[in-house]
Image (cartoon, rainbow, N blue to C red):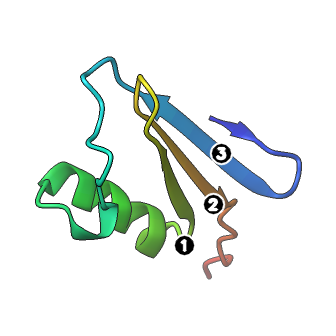
Amino acid sequence: LHHTGTGEIELRFSDSGTGLPGDFDLGNTQSLGLTLVKNLSEKQLRGTIAIISNYPTEFLIKFKEPIYLKRV
């Protein structure tokens, strides 16, 4: 997890599993965990998610640093 220098935060993580199939589609997965990761990345953080399907599988999530409004 680090700042990219362009106003974004980048989160990169991977696993040591067997990897994903070549025809894997994150938008059409039956996995609850991956669905949650996708929705949190894109909808809640308003960012992007990319999957690098080499071994090991790597996920790259980028999002803008949140700016919170001051509460009264």
The image's mark for residue 10 is 3
Q: Are marks 1 and 2 in contact (CB under 8 Å)?
A: yes
Amino acid carrying label 1: it is Arg
Residue 35, quarter of the rendered image: bottom left
The residue most toward the front is: 22
Pointer 2 residue: 63
Q: Which residue is mark 1?
A: 46
Cβ–Cβ below 8 Å for labels 3 and 2?
no
Q: Is residue 45 left or right of residue 66?
A: left
Q: Secondary structure at mark 1?
A: loop
Q: Is 68 left, or right, of 48 in this rendering? A: right
- The amino acid pointed to by label 3 is Glu
Find the distance from the CA under tag 3 to the CA under tag 2: 7 Å
Measure the alpha-carbon separation of dots 1 and 2. 6 Å
x and y percent of residue 49 in the render?
A: 50, 57
Crowding near the residue tagged with mark 1, few <14, some 14–19, many ≥20 C-alpha atoms within 10 Å: few
Secondary structure beneath label 3: strand
Of residue 67 and residue 38, the one placed in the foreground of this image is 38
Q: How far, Cα to Cα, is label 3 from label 1?
A: 13 Å
Q: In what quadrant of the picture does the C terminus appear?
A: bottom right
